[in-house]
């Protein structure tokens, strides 16, 4: 957990202003970047997986997924590059298999949805320390589900979310329902709860 005394804001805007080179390098090395906010579960971490009620709150930090298409056309799979993580007031690089236990299952899921990503590279940027109760699996799952929906070219998810940014009541849009289902499946893979 970040243990440095709070002397300045710790949000996406402040991190981008203080460390522009990190973001510049990340964004410029990717063809596509998708992100989702970090969340904190006040209640229901297990209950909401079984139809119970959960109480979550977004926090002002994000997780980013960067895709570089055809990084290695000879490869039949996906190359998972290292993750860049902001922890204890500094950026660190960590191999993704140290964070995500089921990388082969994640790769199979992504390639089932997006077979044209064979030979691509995926990298990650976390604005928070993974594994400190900020539900990185939910954030990462949401970003991956958004990537899948956008890269299939069949979805109007972004248009729907622009028109209706807060989903209240039953979700009726099939694109959003499909994305929520994908987010749940990805969350299970990413948290090792398969």
Image: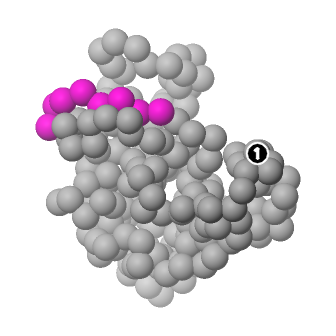
Q: Position of residue 188 (x, y in %)?
A: 25, 54
Q: Position of residue 179 (x, y in %)?
A: 36, 38
Segment colored magenta: 50-57
The stretch drawn in magenta includes residue 34: no
Placement of 124 over or under 145, stated as above or below: below
The tally of labels here is 1
In this rendering, would 16 be left or right of 130? right
Element class at badge 1: loop
Q: Where is residue 54, by image quadrant?
A: top left
Pick whichever, 145 or 174, lies toward us.
145
Q: Where is residue 165, by image quadrant?
A: top right
The stretch drawn in magenta includes residue 56: yes
Q: Position of residue 181 (x, y in %)?
A: 28, 39
In this rendering, would 42 be left or right of 65? left
Quarter of the C terminus within the rendering:
bottom left
Pick whichever, 180 or 20, lies toward us.
20
Q: Position of residue 192 (x, y in %)?
A: 25, 64
Q: Residue at x 52, y 36 (%)?
A: 58
Q: Residue at x 30, y 15 (%)?
A: 170
Placement of 131 over or under 103, stated as above or below: above
Q: Residue at x 33, y 19 (%)?
A: 171
Residue topped by disc 1: 9
């Amino acid at each position: 957990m970040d243990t440095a005394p709070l002397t300045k804001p710790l949000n996406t805007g402040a991190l981008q202003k203080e460390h522009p080179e990190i973001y510049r390098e990340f964004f410029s090395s990717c063809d596509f970047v998708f992100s989702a906010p970090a969340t904190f579960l006040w209640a229901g971490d297990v209950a909401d997986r079984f139809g119970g009620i959960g109480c979550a709150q977004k926090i002002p930090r994000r997780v980013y997924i960067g895709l570089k298409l055809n990084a290695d056309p000879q490869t039949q799979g996906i190359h998972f590059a290292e993750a860049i993580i902001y922890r204890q007031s500094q950026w660190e690089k960590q191999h993704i298999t140290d964070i995500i236990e089921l990388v082969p299952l994640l790769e199979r899921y992504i390639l089932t949805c997006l077979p044209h990503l064979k030979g691509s590279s995926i990298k990650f940027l976390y604005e928070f320390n993974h594994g400190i109760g900020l539900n990185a699996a939910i954030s990462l799952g949401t970003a991956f589900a958004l990537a899948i929906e956008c890269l299939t070219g069949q979805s109007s998810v972004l248009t729907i979310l622009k028109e209706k940014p807060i989903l209240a009541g039953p979700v009726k849009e099939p694109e959003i329902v499909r994305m929520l289902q994908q987010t749940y499946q990805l969350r299970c893979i990413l948290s090792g709860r398969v």
